[in-house]
Structure formats: C-alpha cells, structure tokens
C-alpha cells in the first residue's frame, strides 16, 4: 500500500535504484522457491470448502487475496504472531484462524513475501552490498511494508534523495489542487492553468490528447514533446489508442510498453482442443479451432470450414482434407482416459507444430492423475493475457504515466485521460474475504488489515501526488462512454475538483466539445461530412428495384434471377420454404439466393428448428414403415431410446449434464406427440408407407423439390402426405382459411407433375387420390384442405387453402423473372400476420429491414 516506492542511492556512483524483489534477493542471497499452487493446499474442512467445490478458481483467488492481506498485517511474517485473543468468536475469528492455519501448513507465501521474510530474518552483515534508503517513511505503508523499510534502514542507513520537483505557480488553480486535493479547502478560482473537456469515449480522448499536445507545441506552451505528460488509466484500451493517435500527428510517446500485451495463442488452442476432446464438440469451439493460427491448413480454408460448421454443424471442406490436416481432424474424438487424451493431443501437436503445444501438453500431463479431471485440465490450460513487458522510455517523447504509479519525470503540461468511472482515484471494492465491519473490528483488536477507508485515502493521496508532476497546466479529459457504449459517471476525483473550483456538479466543470462551435475548439479539427439520410439508403418511390439485364447472346446469356444457384447441370430446384420467402419478401429471397445472409456465430441452442428435427426423428423411428401401430406399453418402452438416438444424431450437445432438465421436458413432449399420433393412426386405420420421402416436380416451368415427412395409406386407398409441424394449429389454420398456404399446393404440384419417378408418383399416375395435410405436434391437430374433409380426425381449413398464395406467387415470379424486386414496407410483418395469417420471419433480416419502405399510409393518416 506504499505510495512512494523504496529507493536506494549507491554510495559509489550516486545512482538511484528501486528496491525490487530481485535486488533484495541478489543482495541477501534469498533462496528461490517454486511457484505456489495454492489450490492443492486448500483444506476441505475450512470455511471456504463449499465455495471451493462450486467455484474452485474464484475461491482460490479469494483465499490468496485474504492470505496476502493477513500477511501484510503481520510485521514479522510469522503465522504464530497472528493474535486471536482480542477477536470475539464469530465469522471473522474463524476465517482468520483458517488463514493462519493455511499459512502455517504452507510454510511459504505467494508473491515476493518469501524474499521479504528472508530479509527480515537476516543481519546487516548478510548483505552483499549497501542499500542506503532515500526519502521519508510512507504513511500509507502496511505494517509489513513498514517493517521491511525499518529493517533496511537499520541495516544500511539513509541517503540523500533526489531534489524535489518544482510545482505550479503559487496561487494558481493547479497549485491549489496540488497542495489541497483530498484535504479540504475553500473554493478556488479557475484560471488558465486548468481545463476540462468532455469527449465521447477513450478513442476520442486519445485523438484529442494528440491534437492538444500538437497545439501546445504550435502555440509555444511547451518547447518539446518531453514537456508534455499523459496520465492514463490502467486499461488495455488506452496504450493502443494513444499509439495510433500520436502516430497520426507525428509525435513520439515515451513510456509505452516495449512489448505490448498479447493473446495467449497456445493457451487458446489448447483450451479449444480440450473442449473438443471432452465431447461432444460445440460448433463454436470447432469453428474457433479451424481459424486459429498454427493449424495445418490455410487461413482461407479455415474460414470456409468455420462458416460451414456454424451454418450446418459439419464441414464438407473438412471432410475432404488429407495428410496432416486429416490426422489432426481424426484425433478430435471424445476421450475417456488420460492415455487417450494425451495420445491424441500428441498427435495434434505433431500435426500442427507451429501451434507450440508440446510444452503445455507436458505440463498438463504432469498434473494429470489416473482419471480425467476435466475441470482441473481446463483450469490449467486456460489462456491468459500475456502482460506487457518493459517500458520504452526516452527523453524526446511525450511522457506516458500510469494510474498506479507516480510520474517518473516532471512535465510542464499534464493531460489526464479517463476522468470517469472507477478511476482517479481507483475506487476500492469491498473485500471478498472480510466485510468492512469485520475489518474495523480486527483493527480495533490490533490486526491492521486495510479496509475501503484506508485504500480510498491512499488513492486520493496518490492522485494528488500525480497532479504534482505538472508545473504549468492541467487538462482533464472526461469520456461519456466506455468502448462497449455503456454510459460512464464522473469519477470521484472529478467531483472533488469540481467542488474545489466552485462548481455545483462535475458536469458544470466539463466543456462538452460536441456542443461547442467548431471554431471555438482548443485544437485544430475537421468535421466529417455527414452521411446523407443518416446512412439510410435512397429507395425508389415506387418500391421497385430493377436489376439491369444484359441482352442475351450465345457468349453472354442474360441475367436470370430464378437461376442464380444454377450449376453445370442446370438450375437448382426451389423448395417450398424458399418460395414462401419469395412470397413474403422478394429481397429476402434474393439475398438468400446470393448467400448474403447473417453469419453470426452462436452456440447451439434448443431453438424451434432443433426441437422440430428431434421430434421428426422420434416419430420416424417410433412409427416405422410397414410396422403395426405400437401399443401404449411399447411406446413407453421405445420412446426414451428413440429420443436419445435422435439427440446423439442431431444435437449431441444436449447429452451434457447441464441440459438434463430440457431432456426430461423433451421426453414428456415426445411421449405426448407419439401417443396422439398413434391414436390417430388407429382411428383412421392408416398405415405408414414411407418416412422422409423426397418429392421432385415442376410448377409453371419452375423446378421444385421437397420432402414429405410421412406417407400414409388410408383404408380406402387414398394416400395422405403428411408434414409434421412443431407448432399449434392456430396460425396454420388461419393461413389455410384465408387461402395463403403455399406448401399444400406445391406438394400437390410435385406429385401431379413429377420430374423424377418414384413409388409415390407411380401411385398417383395409377389414379391414387392424394390428400396433403399438416400434423401440428403441439396440439395433435391434423389440418387439410377440402380434399381431406371425410378423413376421421382431420380438420379442413377452407375450400382452397392455397388460392391466394398461388396467385400472388405467379405475380411475384413474373416480376422477378423480369428482373424486378419489390421492396417491403416497414409494417408488412403486421399486415401479413393480420391479413394472411403468415408469420413473416423473412423480414427479420437486417438488410431487408434496412431496405424497407416507410409504413403504408392509412385513410386516418391521410385525413
């Protein structure tokens, strides 16, 4: 908790050095201890045992923080000196006792404390060189830090410190802030030594800071960049943004990390491999693995594989790979023993040597036991951000200072970024181990742990000392939003400064640049030309997009929108679902034909499509072709196995224990659906001819293809073509009643005008009557048009369920065939639902919404 770091001046050269752990270890020959794995030492009988079983990583970090806090309160660093006599019985005493016992059992401590203990137990003669200390004692040091300083002063004595930095001019606003911030004072007048500006976010802050620095150089407030300082929060967002902003204006920054923070690529690959090898492999994990650097395929191949696995759950490109790529993919199979796991990890590491997996795999193997402890393996392999290394400091650059440290050299002008949120000072959070009341009680008992009050006081003092690094001017920058777009509140430091400068609210102190005239800005800037219509496209008034068609020649055939997906063998047929999209939104259909669709990555979820697929598969397996209808006892015995098989085939991720509740719900639903379907088959006397039968035909010269879920033969010889729909009958009934159901008519067209002969088409050719119907799985209703009216348990919905849909399809096909795309209106979704009984899912596409015309005007609007 020190503010001033310990420093020593060499008696021989006069050079100043920081007293670091490495320096103490070298001077006192402190033994090096292996890195402590605290998790292996946590007792199951301690107060944290239940939390450890539930959240081992978080509990280990919390216990380590508590142990360090307790150690800093014990000047001797000896667990036997932890005094419990003055603590009353209760939670605080039990937790301190558990920490003391853990400390005693460990015999060592995390961090630099082992070196500190060695120094405290050493004599002055044990030091290999003198380390006389500079400066005064720190009022904010913990008891342990104070004891270490006292021991070093006793061993080596004192030395002269560096001369004090110059401060701002006496009486200026900046000087008053440097002297009285956080200590209370009367209101002071704002003057030219202080400025405060509001910006949008950290990126705009960085741009403004660079422009402000350049303006200071241009108007002579500073002579060179080294007289400007940047005080920035400890956030990964600022160094990158500042580097880019200052590069644009041509100013160097001194103090940036020599090696910036980096991603742990090896850890990311290993974590993804463990997820895949634990099985079943989530599609997002596979897609992430495919595009990871170091894999034995090209980046473009990896992108294509990732797109395919996200879209369909498997990749055709991946199945065609050979060589080392094939070896790696073949190794991605679920493992059940450590031997399997490390054998397959070794094969993957050999197939992808650039990933650098061998050392990390060896570490995992050393920590593994006789059985696979997946939580432990995931924890050990978890990637972490590789911290920035070193600092690139030089005389000529703009000085970069960080939030937790004092400025490393004085400047004339200081620019403070990020004066919002939890910075300046960084607000201390409540300790995860002890409450503030418990800390106060322990301090009264002589155990000097640091609470929020002590941490906040230190933060205020550190910020005051940081403000002291400027001699002429201070500029505060206040972001309104963070990089996620969340709104930020003014920081505590800004609120205190506003009070000192006589402002009632921090906002009264901030000059919002966006509300100021451009000519009044303190820096040179250019305003971007506004995007016309706010970025909205200019749409034709008649709502028609006319795609230019070339004149057909033998060498250059004209554009045919209905054949966009054509292959060498000719145009691909259209499915009823594609034509339903065309019926709702021609633009949505066109985008789908072109492959211009949303490719957002998302984990597997139990959505409508997955639920429908599972129930379809259960029905197909339970009611096999040519088999008699199962009795109730047979259904109860068979359905659980059929559901498990469907899950393994179509949604293997549902086998995870986390989905147990959903699996039980699915089993109840499957039993209800199968029971109702069996009852329908018995009462109608229908037999199952086929399941999942392909249909191919044509309508008006347009090739069609589809798939009927079930084919039934009625006792009178009629054929019932059934499509299972996992929904209730209400919406489909309304659509059919209003004549807007397209699928019924298209199925009949494929049967009456087939392009490929099958057993079903031969039945139709021989005169068999075809009835098309929907089986609504949610309520067991069977819907058909007028042709199925005399079938038991079948409900008819209108004389001709498709008349309006087919008429409108003919109109749309004519327009699209002529190269014309009719745009939707913004209120079409409500109109389709109300007038046609159609849920217009095709309108949910962002591009379709962006190119939608305004809502249609009503008579009331016109009046």
Image (cartoon, rainbow, N blue to C red):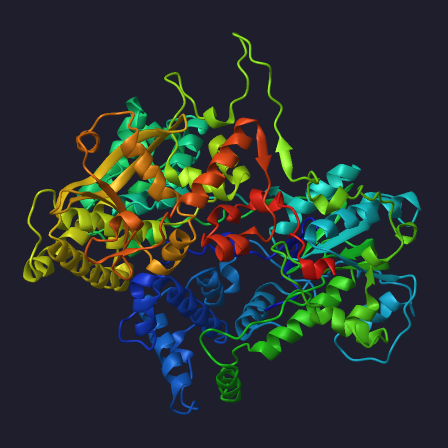
* The quadrant where residue 750 appears: top left
Q: Quick check: 745 left or right of 342?
A: right
Position above or below: 486 against 70: above
Residue 361 locus on image (x, y percent): 31, 41
Q: Quick check: 33 left or right of 667?
A: right
Q: Name the residue furthest top.
A: 554
Q: Nearer the viewer, residue 584 or 27?
A: 584
* The quadrant where residue 80 appears: bottom left
Q: Nearer the viewer, residue 127 or 254?
A: 254
Q: Going 33% across and 32% down the picture, which residue do you hit?
A: 705
Q: Quadrant of the C terminus?
A: bottom right
Q: Number of callouts in the render?
A: 0
Q: Nearer the viewer, residue 62 or 667?
A: 667
Q: Quadrant of the N terminus?
A: bottom right
Q: Quick check: 223 left or right of 606?
A: right
Q: Nearer the viewer, residue 415 or 275?
A: 275
Is any part of residue 435 visible from this angle? Answer: yes
Position above or below: 737 against 465: above
Is any part of residue 406 visible from this angle? Answer: no
Residue 36 locus on image (x, y percent): 37, 58
Q: Quick check: 757 left or right of 594?
A: left
Q: Going 33% across and 75% down the picture, which residue do you hit?
A: 101
* The quadrant where residue 764 appears: top left
Position above or below: 832 against 660: above
Residue 553 locus on image (x, y percent): 55, 9
Residue 719 locus on image (x, y percent): 19, 42
């Amino acid at each position: 908790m020190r503010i001033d770091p310990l420093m020593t001046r060499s008696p021989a050269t006069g050079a100043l050095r920081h007293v670091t752990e490495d320096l103490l270890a070298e001077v006192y020959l402190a033994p090096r201890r292996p890195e402590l794995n605290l998790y292996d030492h946590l007792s199951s009988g301690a107060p944290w045992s239940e939390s450890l079983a539930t959240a081992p990583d978080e509990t280990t970090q919390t216990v380590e923080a508590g142990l360090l806090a307790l150690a800093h309160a014990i000047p001797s660093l000896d667990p036997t000196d932890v005094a419990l006599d003055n603590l009353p019985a209760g939670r605080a005493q039990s937790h301190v006792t558990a920490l003391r016992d853990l400390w005693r059992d460990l015999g060592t401590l995390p961090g630099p404390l082992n070196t500190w203990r060695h120094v405290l137990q050493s004599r002055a003669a044990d030091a290999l060189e003198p380390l006389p200390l500079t400066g005064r004692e720190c009022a904010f040091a913990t008891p342990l830090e104070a004891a270490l300083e006292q021991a070093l002063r006793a061993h080596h004595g004192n030395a002269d410190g560096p001369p004090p930095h110059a401060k701002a001019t006496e009486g200026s606003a900046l000087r008053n802030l440097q002297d009285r911030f956080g200590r209370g004072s009367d209101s002071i007048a704002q003057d030219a030594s202080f400025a405060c500006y509001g910006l949008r976010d950290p990126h705009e802050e960085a741009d403004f800071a660079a422009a402000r620095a350049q303006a200071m150089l241009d108007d002579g407030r500073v002579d060179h960049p080294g007289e400007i300082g940047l005080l920035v929060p400890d956030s990964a967002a600022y160094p990158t943004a500042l580097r880019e902003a200052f590069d644009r204006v041509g100013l160097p920054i001194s103090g940036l990390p020599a090696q910036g923070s980096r991603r742990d690529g090896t850890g990311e690959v290993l974590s993804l491999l463990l997820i895949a090898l634990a099985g079943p492999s989530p599609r997002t994990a596979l897609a992430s693995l495919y595009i990871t650097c170091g894999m034995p395929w090209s980046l473009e191949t990896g992108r294509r594989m990732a797109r395919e696995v996200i879209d369909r759950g498997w990749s055709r490109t991946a199945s065609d790979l050979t060589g080392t790529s094939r070896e790696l993919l073949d190794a991605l199979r679920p493992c059940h023993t450590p031997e399997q796991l490390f054998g397959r990890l070794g094969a993957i590491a050999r197939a992808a040597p650039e990933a650098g997996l061998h050392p990390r795999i060896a570490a995992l193997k050393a920590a593994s036991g006789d059985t696979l402890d997946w939580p432990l393996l995931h924890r050990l392999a978890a990637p972490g951000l590789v911290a920035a290394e070193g600092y690139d400091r030089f005389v000529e650059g703009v000085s970069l200072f960080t939030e937790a440290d004092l400025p490393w050299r004085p400047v004339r002008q200081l620019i403070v970024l990020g004066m919002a949120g939890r910075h300046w000072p960084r607000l201390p959070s409540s300790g995860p181990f002890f409450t503030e009341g418990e800390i106060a009680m322990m301090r009264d008992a002589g155990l000097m742990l640091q609470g929020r009050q002590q941490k906040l006081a230190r933060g205020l003092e550190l910020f005051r000392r940081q403000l002291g690094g400027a001699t002429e001017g201070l500029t505060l920058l206040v972001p309104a939003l963070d990089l996620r777009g969340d709104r930020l509140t003014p920081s505590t430091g800004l609120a205190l400064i506003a009070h000192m400068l006589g402002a009632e609210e921090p906002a009264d102190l901030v000059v919002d640049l966006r509300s100021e005239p451009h000519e009044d800005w303190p820096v040179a800037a250019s305003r971007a030309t506004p995007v016309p219509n706010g970025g909205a496209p200019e749409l034709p008034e008649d709502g028609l997009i006319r795609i230019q068609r070339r004149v057909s020649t033998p060498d250059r055939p004209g554009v045919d929108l209905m054949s966009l997906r054509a292959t060498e063998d000719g145009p691909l047929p259209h499915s009823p679902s594609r034509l339903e999209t065309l019926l709702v939104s021609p633009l949505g259909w066109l985008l789908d034909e072109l492959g211009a669709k949303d490719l957002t990555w998302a984990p597997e979820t139990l959505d409508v499509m997955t639920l429908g697929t599972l129930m379809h598969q259960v029905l197909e397996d339970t009611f096999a072709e040519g088999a008699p209808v199962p009795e109730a006892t047979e259904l109860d015995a068979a359905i659980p196995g059929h559901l498990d098989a469907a899950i393994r085939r179509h949604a293997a991720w549902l086998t995870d224990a986390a989905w147990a509740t959903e699996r039980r719900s699915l089993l109840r639903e499957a039993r209800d659906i199968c029971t109702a379907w069996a009852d329908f088959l018995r009462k109608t006397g229908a037999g199952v001819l086929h399941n999942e039968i392909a249909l191919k035909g044509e309508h008006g010269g347009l090739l069609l293809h589809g798939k009927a879920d079930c084919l039934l033969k009625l006792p009178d010889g009629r054929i019932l073509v059934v499509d299972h729909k996992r929904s209730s009958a209400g919406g489909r009934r309304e659509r059919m009643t209003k004549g807007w159901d397209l699928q019924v008519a298209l199925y009949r067209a494929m049967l009456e005008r087939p392009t490929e002969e099958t057993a079903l088409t031969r039945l139709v050719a021989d005169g068999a009557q075809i009835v098309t119907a929907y089986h609504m799985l949610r309520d067991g209703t069977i819907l058909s048009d007028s042709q199925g009216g005399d079938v038991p348990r079948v409900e008819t919905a209108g004389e001709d369920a498709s008349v309006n849909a087919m008429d409108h399809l003919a109109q749309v096909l004519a327009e699209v065939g002529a190269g014309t795309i009719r745009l939707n209106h913004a209120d079409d979704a409500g109109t389709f639902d109300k007038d046609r009984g159609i849920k217009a899912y095709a309108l949910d596409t962002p591009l379709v919404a962006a190119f939608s015309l305004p809502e249609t005007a009503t008579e009331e609007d016109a009046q």
